[in-house]
Image (cartoon, rainbow, N blue to C red):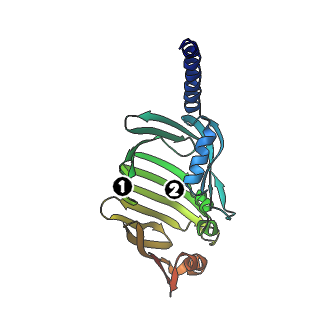
Amino acid sequence: MKHGQGNTPWRWALAGALLGLTLSMVLFAPARWLSSLVRQASGGQVLLMEARGTVWTGSARVTLTGGQGSPAVTMLPGRLDWILAPALGGANVQLNAECCMQQAWSMRVQPRWNGLQVKLSDAQSQWPAWLLAGLGTPWNTIQPQGELQLSTQGLMLVWAAGRLVVTGAAQLDAMNLSSHLSTLRPMGSYRFSLTGGTPITLVLTTQQGSLQISGSGQWVGGQLRFNGEASAAPEHQAALSNLLNLIGRRNGARSIIKVG
């Protein structure tokens, strides 16, 4: 008994040291751990390069790739900063890219039964269109140039039992787009709108330009169904012919777009 009692302080000291080591690992977990998680979750298409700081407060250079075996790579100008703070029932995430965000994005992430809920703050941002080339086919062939303006309103995404439910809305304006496949610069400006609900609806319209694109679709049961068409102003048909061949199936002067 005396022998066991004599070892008790050492046991408490060892337990305290292990607890302190565990807390240190959690509190000061290096940012590269988050880089590994993002790489795995995105299938290698989103990489956090040159990560600095910790999992909780850090920054990195965001790189987009076409995935394994794809030569397509683009890197976001500047660095992306993040703050991850545990909260009751989930976590608060704040993202800020000085190059492209007017204000930081705030997200509330909450695990749910058999799923996950992500609520985004209303925000606006501007991104260079050439970033899309890093995602591989067909963007690395089109190599778009121009500006992407993204805005969200009351956007919330819920993954449950393998299904995605969206409420709120998002709008992406592609301004003054051009492509190395056409000598016409710019080709036009376009708006892609997403409205949550059952089903999720998608609408693509042309705001202005010689390349006219329109279409609509729905996200149903985890599958995207989209139908649209593209055409060129008569005086620019020759300059846009290669691009129309790539966008969809040619039917005379039109290109038929069908997904799903």
The reply to whether callout 2 and callout 1 are in contact (CB within 8 Å) is no
**Which residue is tagged 2?**
148
Q: CA distance from mark 2 to mark 1?
A: 16 Å
* Location of residue 109 by image quarter: top left
Q: How many marks?
A: 2
Q: Secondary structure at mark 2?
A: strand
Residue found at the far bottom of this picture: 252
Residue 104 visible here = no
- Relative to 10, residue 105 above or below: below
**Which residue is located at x 68 percent, y 65 percent?**
69
Q: Quadrant location of residue 223?
A: bottom left
Q: Amino acid at mark 2?
A: Leu
Can residue 106 be seen here?
yes
Residue 150, given in percent of the width and then of the height, sits at 46, 53
Residue 55, horizontal then vertical, whole percent: 56, 37
As drawn, 76 above or below 141 = above
First-in-chain label (2 vs 1):
2
Q: Which residue is mark 1?
A: 169
Please name the amino acid that badge 1 sits on.
Ala
In the rendered structure, the answer to whether residue 106 lies left or right of residue 70 reads left
Name the residue located 41 percent from the left edge and 72 percent from the top edge. Answer: 225
> Badge 1 local density, few (<14 within 10 Å), some, or many (20+)?
some
Q: Residue at point 60% right, 52% down?
A: 39
Name the element at disc 1.
Answer: strand
- The label shown at residue 179 is none
State the residue in front, 129 or 35: 35
In front: label 2 or label 1: 1
Which is more toward the observer, 137 or 250?
Answer: 137
